[in-house]
Image (cartoon, rainbow, N blue to C red):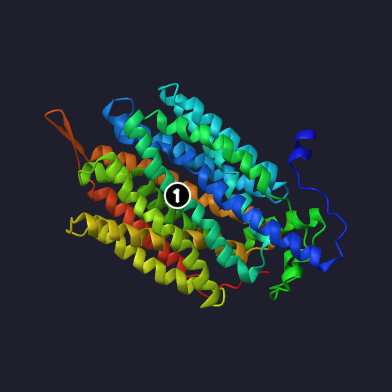
Amino acid sequence: MKLFRFFSTGINLPLLTDKQEIDKRYKKYRLNVMLAVTLGYGLAYPLRLALSAMKKPLIDANIFSATELGAIGSALLYAYAFGKLTNGFLADHANVKRFFAFGVVLSSLINLLIWQSTILWVWIVLWGMNGWFQGFGAPTGAVTLANWFSTRERGRLYGIWSTSHALGELLTFLVSTTLVAFFGWKAGFWGPGVFCLFVAVGIYLLLQDRPQTMGLPPVADWKHDHVQQNNTSEKYIKTGAAQLSILKLPSIWILGLASATMYVTRYAINSWGIFYLQEAKGYSLVEAGGIIGSNTVAGLVGCVAYGFISDNLFKARRPPVTLIFGIIEIISLFVIFVSPLTNPTVLTLAFVVYGFTLSGLLAALGGLFAIDIAPKKAAGAVMGFIGVFSYIGAGVQDQISGYLIEHGTTIVGGVRHYNFDTVILFWIGASIVSLVLAVTLWNVKVSD
């Protein structure tokens, strides 16, 4: 019971009456929590993507096959999916300061342990546990945004927070690949593992519990930003009832499927993109990491751009912007995988466009639109619910991709040759299905 009390959210303190003091505290803590959830989540991201930087070295050394690496990668993604769901429900009740920092510490420790063995089942178990603890982060961000930022500013702030994904991917594709190239595959684990122990300390120092636990009014009251409710006013709904209510919303289920298929494409690039560029295009590990990294740099801008455009040009309506971004994203995938153009500049530009648009789509389908639709008290739960769909899709992708890549492999004179045609069709098709599903949500109304 003491453990639960340690992680549970604090009690509401009596409201402050000094308006200037309230304004001062809100401005200070809002900056701190945004830094914590954005930089903290981004810097901790390489803890889950380490494997993508070392697939070719592991295959070439005959430590694991592509199918086995697919099983290891999917273990993290499946565990992350259900961890994100359960942790999402817990985060609505938690002191997110302690909750998030604890998850990063445990994820770091697993990265420091896993490389000391090359037994398949050990990797599957440990990498799966890593996925579970990584699932502390996204619900924390959703709860923090819902508690500290009002509806009409949430798109912009969600866009800023979503840059954490791109930041983490950039660190993996540039820093982790360099560590692996110079110090061997084990460095891809112990480098992020050591660094993120310090990241956890920074998260704990900056992140804050709910405003009401500090004597501050709810953010909607402070910002005078209340939108019309679809039914009973949310302030009279208990957290548990609000969480269960999301299961009755067809739009949330459709959004989950749209996110799942989008995550197939996303994690195809994240998990297999470097390997594809090495084998299909002939780039070195560092070169491939640099090209893939270009899409994450663009993603930093894409997240913010999506939030700004949807908030300011479409009055917080997400579907029109999703349609625009989705069409451009699919075109960029055809240039990357299908176009006969082989110029590295063209390829890099295509990855830039892909990263820009994909990050915006992930911001919307992976959480922002769900937070708009669901009651605010269920922000963590709906983030976790969408996360289950998203990462089951990503996990299925890793297994299918590994299988298709291995079965498209021929060995001639002791040299492996890969045919990526079938797996590319799978990756692009997933993005097309995602866009079709997302467009069906054109007229969905939002909550407060």
Front position in the image: 135 or 204: 204
| Percent of width and height locating residue 143 | 66, 55
Give the residue displayed 70% in from the left and 56% down from the top.
29
Quadrant hosting residue 69: top left
76 vs 201, left or right, is left
| Percent of width and height locating residue 18 | 85, 66
Question: In the rendered image, is residue 245 in sight?
Answer: no
The quarter in which the C terminus is drawn is: bottom right
Tell me the kind of residue under disc 1.
Answer: Gly
The quarter in which the N terminus is drawn is: top right
Q: Which residue is mark 1?
A: 393
Mark 1 lies on a secondary structure that is helix
Question: In the rendered image, is residue 300 in sight?
Answer: yes
Say how many tags the image has. Answer: 1
92 vs 364, left or right, is right
Give the residue displayed 29% in from the left and 35% down from the top.
56
| Percent of width and height locating residue 409 | 21, 37
Give the residue displayed 39% in from the left and 66% down from the top.
326
189 vs 103, left or right, is left
| Percent of width and height locating residue 259 | 48, 57
Quadrant hosting residue 129: top right
150 vs 132, left or right, is right
